[in-house]
Amino acid sequence: MKKILAVMALSAFLLGRCTPAAMPENLKQPDPAAVSEAAANKEYAPLNYEYQKGMWIPYLDYAEYMQGKTADDFRSAIRKRLSDAADSGTNTVYVHIRPTGDAYYKSTFFPKGRYLDGDYDPLEIMLDEAHKLGLSVHGWINPLRLQTAEEMETVPDSAITKQWYSSGDSMNIGETGGRLYLRPDSPEVRELLANEIREIIGSYDVDGIHIDDYFYPDTDPSFDSESFALSGESDLTKWRTDAVSEMVKAMYSAVKDTDERVLFGISPQGNVRADYETQYADVRRWISEKGFCDYIVPQIYYGFKNETLPFTSVLEEWERMAENSNVRLIIGLGAYKLGKEDRWAGESGESEWLDDPGIIDKQTQAVLDSSADGYAVYY
């Protein structure tokens, strides 16, 4: 078991190249020193566990909890969800607070969450109820994923993303598969993400900030051809990979500059090859170098009999990567697959999640027997 992580504040990141669009004056960050002082003066001390037993609470569940419901209704529903989690042994929850360019907290930068039709603050309620149960709460955001083009038309004009989109700003926003995405190579985008994190930590008693595997949205060279041409670089893969790492570093720095006690975690795909080839996610660097994350949660959503990515082999690969690292290794487990056919697992593993209802218990035990620092389950 690795020692408890010793975190350190980092200096602000360099912005890199300039782009035409600038952050509107009314949306620029407050004085970082003032935000950090306010966070440090909060009575609340972040709660985090040496051995993490986590669970994701995705925004897809919010429709049931929020639509047509009052604040009391939401509180009652989320209290039941969190109580069940605590009773099952969970000590950490990753709650979705910015999934698709919308916010389930009081945000200066992003519009109100699509499922939130009441006038209350879901994050405030989730924090209150979770902390009563001794649960650590990490605010889960998708850094780059935005609305569809159709949905963006309904976003308030005050939102910076709407302003970028309406102005035809292709340097900060791109589109693929009918959905819009922020561009990780843009200094303005990285500034926006850093400001968002400062706002969240400065305003709420979160114990961590958590991002998942929506990194680069497309492998097609046309997605960012204009930005790449302006960069003067010659290696598209390296340029994209470096851009994602700079984004991650900027977010980590924003966390630590605001409150070094708050953790920053990343949940990439479990498939390391795919991390590099389709997401441009330099997971080996993030684990081995300081300044990218406090913990990493690879989504090892594979059965033991998976023909290309068997659970045990993938777990061992991540263990080797995390060896001698100060980054905690938390293993993501895919309980959502239980009772379903896994058509990507090959002939031998196709029915494993149907035939073996105890597979998650077996995987949990494998993690407990490993050098990992915990596990997290996606239901």
Image (cartoon, helix red, strand yellow):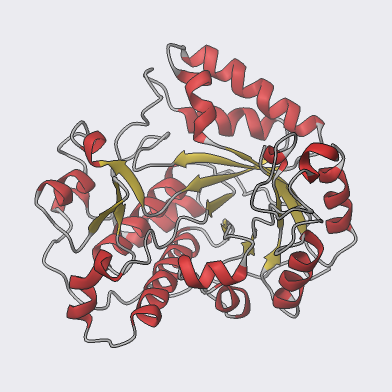
Q: Residue at point 54% right, 28% down?
A: 61
Examine the rendered structure and indicate whether residue 132 appears above or below residue 91: above
Examine the image and state in which quarter residue 115 appears: top left
Where does residue 299 sit, x and y in percent of width and height?
64, 55
Q: Quadrant of the C terminus?
A: top right
Total tally of numbered discs in the picture:
0
Examine the image and state in which quarter residue 342 appears: top right
Inspect this view and state whether residue 165 appears.
yes
Where does residue 152 sit, x and y in percent of width and height?
23, 38
Where does residue 159 sit, x and y in percent of width and height?
21, 42
Q: Residue at point 77% right, 42% down?
A: 353
Q: Name the residue at the front extreme.
A: 347
Left or right of 276: which side holds 105? left
Q: Residue at point 72% right, 41% down?
A: 335
Q: Residue at point 74% right, 61% down?
A: 307
Where does residue 34 sit, x and y in percent of width and height?
36, 56
Left or right of 173: which side holds 52? right
Q: Quadrant of the N terminus?
A: bottom right
Examine the rendered structure and indicate whether residue 85 appears above or below residue 55: above
Between 193 and 168, the residue placed more toward the observer is 168
Examine the image and state in which quarter residue 264 appears: bottom right
Inspect this view and state whether residue 292 appears.
no
